[in-house]
Amino acid sequence: MNETDKKRILERLENMRGEILAKIRPREQRYETEKPPEQPYVFLQQRMEKPGKIVEGIPEFLEWLWLVTVAVFRVIRFFWR
């Protein structure tokens, strides 16, 4: 392999390196220059809070349902005798 071949190969490798870096750098620069939102994940927090409020009410609802069911069966048992 003579010197001209070595030079040509090195130039081609440098060009390939430049092409690869050109594809990668814009992505990195975009991430560095983007300003983070002032209130991140607000939408996600709102979505998570709503099911939480519903889930909080379920045990109370089940307790009332149980009390009503017990009362109804006691009334039925009272009239059955």
Image (cartoon, rainbow, N blue to C red):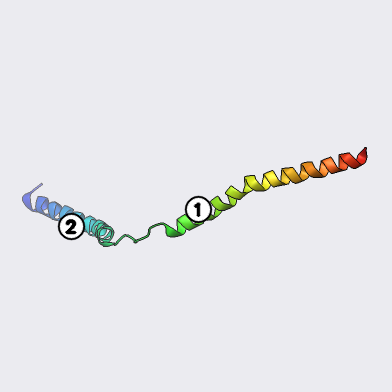
**Observer-nearest residue: 55 or 70?**
70
Q: Is residue 60 left or right of residue 11?
A: right
**Residue situated furthest right in the rendering:** 81
Hey, what amino acid is under mark 2?
A: Asn
Q: Position of residue 44 (x, y in %)?
A: 46, 56
Which badge, 1 or 2, comes first in the chain's sequence? 2
In the image: residue 69, left or right of residue 38: right
Image quarter of the C terminus: top right
- Label 1 neighbourhood size at 10 Å, few (<14), some (14-19), many (20+)? few
Between 62 and 37, the one lying in front of the other is: 62
Circle 2: is it few (<14), some (14-19), or many (20+) Cα within 10 Å?
Answer: few
Residue at left 10%, top 46%?
1
Task: Indicate the secondary structure of the residue bearing disc 1.
Answer: helix
As rendered, which of 39 and 25 lies closer to the eye? 39
Among all residues in the image, which is located at the extreme left? 3
What secondary structure is found at the residue carrying circle 2?
A: helix
Horizontal arrangement in the rendering, residue 7 relative to residue 42 (left or right): left
Instruction: Give the label, 1 or 2, closer to the camera.
Output: 1
Q: Name the residue under label 2.
A: 15
Residue 63 on image: x %, y %:
68, 44
Residue linked to disc 1: 48
Three-letter code, disc 1: Met
User: What residue is shown at x 88% (from left), y 40% (from top)?
Assistant: 78
- Residue at the image point whose x is 73% and y is 43% from the top: 67
| Residue contact at pointers 1 and 2, CB within 8 angstroms | no
Disc 1 and disc 2: Cα gap in Å?
A: 50 Å
Please count the marks in the image.
2
Judge by depth and name the residue closer to the eye, 80 or 44. 80
Q: In this view, does 68 lie to the left or right of 5?
A: right
